[in-house]
Image (cartoon, helix red, strand yellow):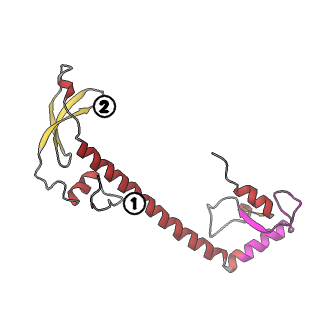
């Protein structure tokens, strides 16, 4: 189901999104909806066919035949799936934007005089030797953690050679 609907905001609920897209105008068309309670009982409630708004409980079925009432329509499932995909896409875009902002700030930090001075002190501490293999010349200062990025402690940084740095960043096979 592909239609032009707005992208949900991070704090928007499904019902708010339905109303914002004109799917339900408040004039509810009710039908019986089957639900399972926390204690695993089956109950029926009135549910709007357009937005899914539920009213009070109607009746608890007692016979197996009564328990076969229809649940949600295919249209409802399609709209809910569309909403969930849009919500995930919006979240991923937001996370990508934050990642881009962080890396921009971090790269600027690596160009700062404060970082250069700290990097120089870490290299001096290691006496120019790789702290990974203790044999090659150190060429990188590697972060053990980014928890204090932009205001690092010297003990969170190690001097490493090219080979050890590659080894640290090697992706584990899945």
Whole-percent x, y for residue 31 in the image:
13, 39
| Residue denoted by label 2 | 38
- Residue found at the far right of this picture: 135
Secondary structure of the residue carrying tag 1 is helix
- Residue found at the far front of this picture: 2
Q: Is residue 134 magenta?
A: yes
Whole-percent x, y for residue 65 in the image:
18, 21
Whole-percent x, y for residue 40 in the image:
30, 27
Which of these two is toward me, 148 or 90? 90
Where, quadrant-wise, is the C terminus in this rendering?
top right
Which of these two is toward me, 3 or 102? 3
Distance between mark 2 and mark 1 Cα atoms:
31 Å
Q: Nearer the viewer, mark 2 or mark 1?
A: 1
Using residue 102 as the reference point, say whether residue 4 is left or right of it: left
Q: Which mark is residue 90?
A: 1
Using residue 31 as the reference point, say whether residue 85 is left or right of it: right
Using residue 142 as the reference point, say whether residue 46 is left or right of it: left
In which image quadrant can residue 161 be found?
A: bottom right
Q: What span is in magenta?
A: 116-143
Q: Which mark is residue 141?
A: none
In which image quadrant can residue 125 be found?
A: bottom right
Q: Is residue 30 above or below residue 59?
A: below
């Amino acid at each position: 189901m592909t239609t032009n609907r707005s992208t949900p905001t991070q704090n928007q609920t499904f019902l708010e999104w339905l109303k914002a897209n004109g799917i339900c105008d408040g004039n509810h068309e009710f039908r019986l909806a089957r639900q399972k309670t926390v204690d695993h009982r089956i109950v029926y409630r009135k549910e709007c066919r357009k937005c899914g708004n539920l009213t009070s409980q109607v009746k608890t079925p007692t016979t197996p035949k009564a328990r076969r009432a229809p649940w949600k329509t295919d249209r409802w499932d399609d709209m809910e799936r569309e909403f969930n995909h849009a919500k995930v896409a919006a979240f991923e875009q937001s996370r990508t934007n934050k990642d881009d902002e962080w890396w921009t700030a971090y790269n600027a930090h690596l160009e700062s005089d404060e970082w250069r001075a700290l990097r120089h002190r870490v290299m001096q501490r290691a006496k120019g030797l790789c702290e990974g293999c203790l044999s090659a010349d150190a060429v990188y200062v590697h972060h053990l953690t980014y928890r204090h990025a932009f205001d690092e402690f010297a003990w969170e940084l190690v001097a490493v050679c090219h080979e050890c740095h590659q080894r640290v960043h090697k992706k584990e096979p899945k």
